[in-house]
Image: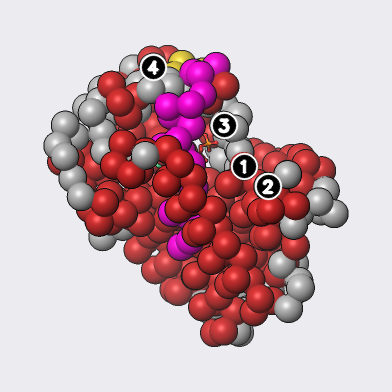
Amino acid sequence: MHAVARRHIAFDLQGYLENRTALINRALDRFLPRENTRPATIHQAMRYSLFAGGKRMRPALCLAAAAACGGQEKLALPLACAVECIHTYSLIHDDLPAMDDDDFRRGKPTNHKVFGEGIAVLAGDALLTQAFQIAIQCRMGTRYSHREIILEIARAAGSLQLIAGQVADLESEGKKIPAARLKYIHERKTSALLCCSVRLGGMSANCSSTQLEALTRFGYNVGLAFQIIDDILDITQTSAQLGKTAGKDTAAQKATYPSIVGLENSRRTATRLTQRAFAALKAFKGNAHALEALAGYLLQRQN
Ligand code: GRG
């Protein structure tokens, strides 16, 4: 067995994920307007993508980070749901014909295929806005205010991070780019929101500055590893396994880690980044089992 996988043998990750996914889904259901709330089309479209069966990795990381800092996971739930809304919005927009033009996401037809492009744009917009409305419902401790929470989310989702990554991604299509440019894209398009997820979990638990710094290093490295694995899966798995169209990166002539440094080198880099993430968890003195198990799983995942 892989050395990284061996570390998590005692932790019931499957049980943990099932339980937290159910918790997150129930909370999302409470936070979102009902399907028949007028105008019903937009609420149906928002719920369609939100409940289409995502892995819920960002909210799970948010809850696990809260626990690692000695906090109550339930207090982090609004923040966990907020990041999942932002993630889902980014997927809906990424799938639009003007972006990646995809027909298949989370094992289902993409939002614009079901509701049309106009409603899909609006469903993404509405989920992004909804995220702030949900986040503000978090009960904060003494160290971090709602202002800091909102700033944290806005920065990760804004034009210097998530959007910057997507812009660079669009502008790099069909071009040969150096590995440093690809890292810039991955840091913004993927790592920023993962990093934000764990930081928010820590902040909801009133974490110390040392803990927040450790979570930042953990999230950054896990985020980069996550995207490299995503690039690898795009060429090694089928569409049915991924629940989205496989081979898209090659078809769109996108620069990926495997296309620049090869498959084996990409796997080694993802493993090295995950080991750095594990090293960051030392700050939690053995109290970050869920975070550790999640990072191990993200490296080994098959979809
Ligand atoms: C704001 C116009 C506009 C677009 C934003 C940033 C962006 C578009 C899209 C990003 C989409 C993307 C492919 C991001 C990379 C991160 C990634 C691999 C997402 C898939 O995450 P998973 O595997 O998905 O966690 P599930 O469906 O399981 O939640």
Image depth: mark 1 or mark 4 in front: 1
Please name which of the two marks, 2 or 1, marks the residue nearer to the observer: 2
- Labels 4 and 3: the sequence-earlier one: 4
Q: Earlier in the sequence, mark 2 or mark 3?
A: 2
Q: Is mark 4 within 8 Å of ligand 1?
A: no
Q: Is residue 106 left or right of residue 110?
A: right
Disc 4 vs disc 2: which is toward the camera? 2
How dense is the environment of label 4, judged by Cα within 10 Å: few (below 14), some, or many (20 and up)? some
**Residue 221 lies in the magenta stretch:** yes
Q: Are marks 2 and 1 in contact (CB under 8 Å)?
A: yes
Q: Which residue is mark 3?
A: 303
- Residue depicted at x 30% and y 26%: 250
Label 3 environment density (alpha carbons within 10 Å; few <14, some 14–19, many ≥20): some
Task: Write down the quadrant of residue 180 in the picture.
Answer: bottom left
Label 4: which residue?
A: 103
Q: Which mark is residue 300?
A: 1
What's under tag 2, amino acid-wise? His
* Magenta region, residue range: 220-240
186 relative to 106, above or below: below
Q: Are marks 4 and 3 in contact (CB under 8 Å)?
A: no
Q: Looking at the figure, which quarter contains the C terminus? A: top right
Q: Mark 1 or mark 4: which comes first in sequence?
A: 4
Mark linked to residue 63? none
